[in-house]
Image (cartoon, rainbow, N blue to C red):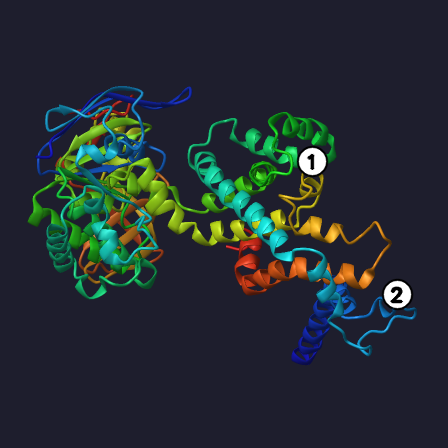
Amino acid sequence: MGRIVLKDVRKAFGDVEVIPPLNLEINEGEFVVFVGPSGCGKSTLLRLIAGLEDVSGGAIEIDGQDMTDVPPAKRSLAMVFQSYALYPHMSVRKNIAFPMRMAGMDQAEQDKRIAHAANILNLTDYLDRRPGQLSGGQRQRVAIGRAIVREPAAFLFDEPLSNLDAALRHGMRVEIGELHKDLATTMIYVTHDQVEAMTMADKIVVLRAGHIEQVGSPLELYRNPRNLFVAGFIGSPTMNLFEGAAAQEHDARTIGVRPEHLAPSKTEGLWKGRVGLSEHLGSDTFLHIHDTGLTDTITVRAGGEVDLHHGDTVYLTPEADKIHRFDESGLRIA
Amino acid sequence: MARAASTRAKIGWTALAWGIAFLIFFPILWTILTSFKTEAEAIAAPPSYLFFDWTTENYGVVQDRSNYMRFLWNSVIIAGGSTILGILVAVPAAWAMAFQPTPRTKDVLLWMLSTKMLPAVGVLYPIYLICIQLGVLDNRAALVFILMLINLPIIVWMLYTYFREIPGEILEASRMDGATLKDEIFYVLTPMAIPGIASTLLLNFILAWNEAFWTLNLTSVDAAPLTAFIASYSSPEGLFFAKLSAASTMAIAPILILGWFSQKQLVRGLTFGAVK
């Protein structure tokens, strides 16, 4: 259960085509992340799958059945919203029970499922509270609980963590990841945060202006970005990109080197520059290097502690087999 | 220093607020006081404020002369009926405009409001004639319907404003959860909008209760509410201020008490949206 296929799905609002015809297959049990800058159409795509928006063309299949014109509730999908979208006038128990109540499920089964979900999500002590009396993380868990009890074919998450603070976000990320492993249900997760995408996904779909730029596992995207956009979007800090002579040496219009693939040295190396700022984290050292003649700032990530500080001269050498080459149209040169 | 100045300012503002409140309330207070005077004292100049011979004689006369309970009952039916009917019509309308807006929604809302700019007397003739044709002159049901129509723009506007404050994602969540349109309005939207609906109900009830133009023009005996009850004391055998005041006091007392008990709700309703 939980195989979703999009066939030439397109969406236009009036004359504006936000999603040009798009094809995508999501396999059973996969954790798929839609990632892209704001306005790239990732949330719209999710809403099309959910049925909250009507497609302007194409077809959506869920488990082999055409669901294009089926109302949201009949698609056996459950959605977790960014704002949690809990019913403020109902207790946690009633919130979680709502989809089952709408389905007319018998009370005993409802109670069983509520107890089960509350147990998984650590909500047992909060069942009789109102959402207003819960913290952000707890509210999000209630929203997930409401989704779980439906036993859907797939879960849809629309930027579920962006309203949480950093510490909580990390915790919930782990919880959702574990939940996916436990339930083994298909999950589609929308985020603009590429760290969330890298850490959670089985498969990442990078979107820009409604187009799919690349689909692949996190490491595939990291190692072999298909074009400049994906190269710049995936990875943190972002890939260093150079044009001009340095690129021409490699028969490319643009070359890219990730910060962790540049070796800094005080004495010798391929490119010479000056340290603008050094960030010492203990586990890593981040160097922001200027005056290389290649580009404004080169970011370097060195493992462990590196004794380089503001104003020091530094030499950089890229790892030869880690240089990404791109042609005039921005596409990767194999 | 700063603290002293702010305390002085506070006292000043408080005094001003009480002063304004007293000014607004004074006519009502004067009416109530006058209702306890004799006719002679009621028109005495200079007037006596609190030190006169208090008497409840006027209330007795008014009660003897007309059947207060019948007028009261008509008022309750007309104000209550038109309000409930109005809410039933306005909830779906406001839902549609708040959550399924079209490019024309704003125009429709403005057009509805513009009907309030028309002087009521402008449509008196046609409506009066229609009532005669249909044989519903001096008919409570007809008044319920007419007052509902008159206040509908305000009800829709108020509900629309409240509904707009409800996040659409919650309604979408209910749709995902399998709620039909009816379930969505009944189980999710309405309970969430209860404070807004309650203050709309209340305000509209007060408006309908106090409505005098249509109730006076379209009723005579059977459907006459308290407005007609007051009016019946303003003529024909001359002005009897004390009795008129007694009748007025009796007419406004129920709504005054209702307003007193629900003032918190009313204030919240009227300032809703202004402060989030």
Dot 1 lies on which element? helix
Q: Quadrant of residue B256?
A: bottom right
Name the residue at 72% across, 28% down.
B125
Whether residue B20 is visible here, answered yes or no, is no
**Looking at the picture, which amino acid does disc 1 mark?**
Met
Provide residue B203's location: percent of width, then percent of height.
58, 51
For the residues tagged 2 and 1, is the chain the same?
Answer: yes
Q: Is residue A169 visible?
A: yes
Residue B117 is labelled as 1
Q: Nearer the viewer, residue A50 or A188?
A: A50
Q: Residues within 10 Å of mark 2 (few under 14, many from 20)?
A: some
Q: Where's residue A202, x and y in %?
A: 12, 40
Query: Separation of disc 2 and disc 1 at Cα?
Result: 38 Å
> Seen in the image, is B132 located left or right of residue A294?
right
- Residue in front for this viewpoint, A318 or B205: B205
Q: Which residue is mark 2?
A: B43
Residue at x 33%, y 41% (from the top left corner): B184
Chain assignment, label 2: B
